[in-house]
Image: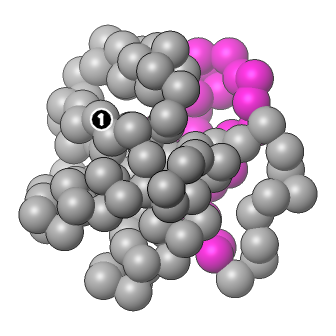
Amino acid sequence: MCLVLVVDDEELARVSMAAILAMLGHEIIQARDGLEALLIYRMKQLKIHLVLMDIAMPRMDGIAAAKVMRAVNPAARIILVSGDAAQVPPEVEPSGFLLKPFRSKALCAIVQQALEGVG
């Protein structure tokens, strides 16, 4: 199906999101923080269909990484994830926002919505 970059510094959250999306048939790449995500994105941006990224991470947070990804590719599809809805500044304009904790059904729905028209 699609290549999804899953970014979260919490291993359990990252692995869980990756496993759920893999069960839907997506190919997954994982990153532990925004800096690692940017390195991967710059190498594979033409192949990555969606970035699913936590906001609060060490070294580089998800908002800073999303801004750089959008500068590289204004059409980048980025879903931000956080335990605090107030963390998303309006200038980021994510393709979606997922509030932690969430159910796998909510994750699948927002990913499907963000990927509409891809393929």
| Residue at the extreme front | 59
Q: In this orientation, does residue 113 appear?
A: no
Give the secondary structure at mark 1. Answer: strand
Magenta span covers which residues?
92-113
Q: Residue at x 46, y 66 (%)?
A: 65
Q: Is residue 113 depicted above or below 92 in this figure?
A: above
| Mark 1 surroundings within 10 Å by alpha-carbon count, few (fewer than 14), some (14 through 19), many (20 or more) | many
Q: Residue at x 59, y 16 (%)?
A: 104
Quadrant assignment for the N terminus = top left
Q: Residue at x 88, y 57 (%)?
A: 86
Q: Residue at x 77, y 72 (%)?
A: 89
Q: Nearer the viewer, residue 116 or 27?
A: 27
| Residue 118 location (% of width, % of height) | 28, 55
Which quarter of the picture shows residue 25?
A: top left
Q: Is residue 40 depicted above or below 24 in this figure?
A: below
Instruction: Tell me the amino acid under the disc marked 1.
Output: Gln
User: Could you tell whether 88 is left or right of 40 in the image?
Assistant: right
Q: Which residue is mark 1?
A: 30
